[in-house]
Image (tube, rainbow, N blue to C red):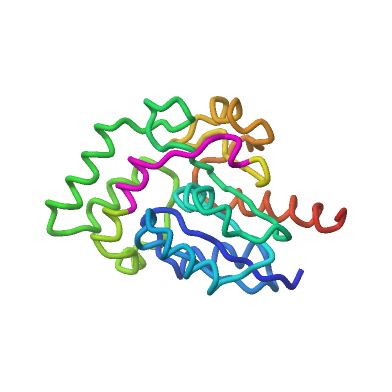
């Protein structure tokens, strides 16, 4: 499959690492990575989505919420997918998120006050199954970008109907998402057994779905 893929990154991921993970699931494809630096800004979204046109758009975690916000900028002919989809990151909204406001504010405070931002990142990821090589922790975006990402996760929410034209995939053991609750909002959601928040197996499942979809289109 020699297609172009634009993948929108999750929060605090090294873009180079995420590109490698996507490329390994879709060998032979041209992979482009978007890491939104100011996710709430439509102007940035327009520039990035014009710069990186694709046959397949993938939004992972925070990237899924970003793609839902700017879905009107995507071409009708492309395939669109959400991995570990977020309608709202916060538990209080009842849209599948499992994170409390207290947890999110603690993480923001740790980033603002700590002299070593990598310590806050490592602490955050220690609660999930999202390991990337330790040496790449220096390649994650800088503090201000990370804080704007957290603010986006705290303030923006999408509706389940926004995802109706997307393939949506979540792991049943995702620590940040209640898959059963999310499925009440996204009925076509695939819940993958034995899988958590990390993107590798979600991408493999998507690769199988996309091949089937292309074959039958």
Q: Position of residue 12 (x, y in %)?
A: 36, 57
Q: Residue at x 63, y 43 (%)?
A: 168
Q: Nearer the viewer, residue 27 or 167?
A: 167
Q: Position of residue 46 (x, y in %)?
A: 49, 65
Q: Is residue 17 left or right of residue 170?
A: left
The quarter of the rendered structure image containing the N terminus is: bottom right
Q: Report the span colored magenta.
A: 149-163
Rendered view: 214 above or below 98: below
Rendered view: 27 above or below 156: below
Q: Is residue 213 left or right of residue 47?
A: right
Q: Position of residue 151 (x, y in %)?
A: 30, 47
The quarter of the rendered structure image containing the C terminus is: bottom right
Q: Nearer the viewer, residue 165 or 187?
A: 165
The outermost residue toward the right is 216
Asked if the magenta segment contains residue 25, the reply would be: no
Rendered view: 149 above or below 168: below
Question: Does the magenta stretch mainly form a helix, a strand or a loop?
Answer: helix
Asked if the magenta segment contains residue 160, the reply would be: yes
């Amino acid at each position: 499959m020699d297609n172009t893929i634009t993948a929108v990154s999750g929060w605090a991921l090294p873009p180079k690492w995420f590109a490698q993970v996507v490329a390994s699931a879709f060998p032979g494809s041209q992979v482009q990575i978007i890491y939104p630096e100011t996710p709430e800004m439509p102007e940035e979204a327009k520039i990035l989505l014009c710069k990186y046109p694709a046959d397949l758009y993938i939004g992972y975690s925070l990237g899924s919420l970003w793609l839902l916000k700017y879905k009107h900028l995507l071409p009708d002919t492309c395939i669109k997918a959400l991995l570990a989809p977020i309608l709202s990151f916060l538990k209080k909204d009842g849209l599948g998120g499992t994170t409390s406001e207290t947890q999110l504010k603690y993480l923001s405070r740790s980033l603002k006050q700590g002299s070593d931002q990598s310590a806050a990142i490592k602490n955050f990821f220690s609660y999930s199954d999202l390991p990337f090589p330790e040496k790449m922790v220096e390649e994650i975006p800088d503090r201000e970008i990370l804080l704007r990402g957290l603010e986006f996760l705290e303030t923006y929410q999408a509706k389940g109907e926004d995802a109706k034209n997307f393939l949506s995939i979540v792991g049943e053991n995702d620590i940040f998402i209640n898959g059963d609750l999310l499925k009440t909002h996204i009925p076509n959601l695939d819940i993958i057994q034995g899988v958590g928040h990390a993107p590798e197996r979600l991408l493999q499942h998507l690769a199988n779905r996309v091949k089937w979809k292309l074959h039958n289109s």
